[in-house]
Amino acid sequence: MKKLWGKEDNNVSREDKFLRDYILQREWKNEGDRIEKEIDEEDERREDEMDDYERELNFRFEEDGGKEIQTHSRTVDDTMRKKESKRSTQRQAKKTREQE
C-alpha cells in the first residue's frame, strides 16, 4: 500500500489522501472500539432494565398486600347513571305481553 500511494502528497487528491491515511493508520479499528463500547453500554443498560422488571415480577407476591386480589364492585352507589333505561323498559313490556 505504501508503494502505491508513496509519501509524496503533491500528486494525491484530498479524498485519496484521506483514504490513504485511513487505511495505513488502521483508523477503522479505533472507530470499531468506540462503537463496541457504545454497544456494551447499551447492553448493560438494557440488562439492568430487564433485571429490574424480572425482580418486580418475581417478588410481586412478597410485597404488602400481594397475596390479596383487589376487587371492585359492579354497582357504584354514587353514579350519575340512570337506573332505568329504554332497553329495560322494553324488556319488561315484552315479558308482560308474553305472560298475557
Image (cartoon, helix red, strand yellow):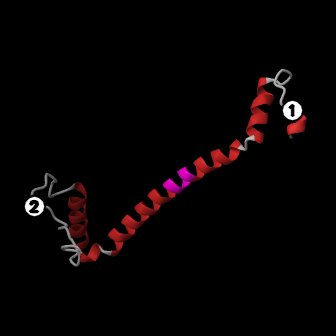
Picture disc at residue 6: 1
Residue drawn at 15 percent across, 54 percent down = 82
Circle 1 Cα neighbour tier, 10 Å, few/some/many (<14 / 14–19 / ≥20): few
Q: Is residue 100 visible?
A: no
Q: Nearer the viewer, residue 94 or 6?
A: 6
**57 horizontally vs 16: left or right:** left
Q: Position of residue 65 (x, y in %)?
A: 19, 74
Residue drawn at 46 percent across, 63 percent down = 47
Most extreme residue toward the left, as rendered? Answer: 78
Residue drawn at 35 percent across, 70 percent down = 55
Q: Is residue 27 visible?
A: yes
Which quadrant of the rendered structure holds the C terminus?
bottom left
Circle 2 residue = 77
Check disc 2 and give the amino acid type: Asp
Q: Which residues are magenta?
A: 37-41
Judge whether residue 40 is colored magenta. yes
- Give the vertical position of 16 relative to 2 (above or below): above
Judge whether residue 51 is colored magenta. no
Total count of labels: 2
Q: Secondary structure at mark 1?
A: loop
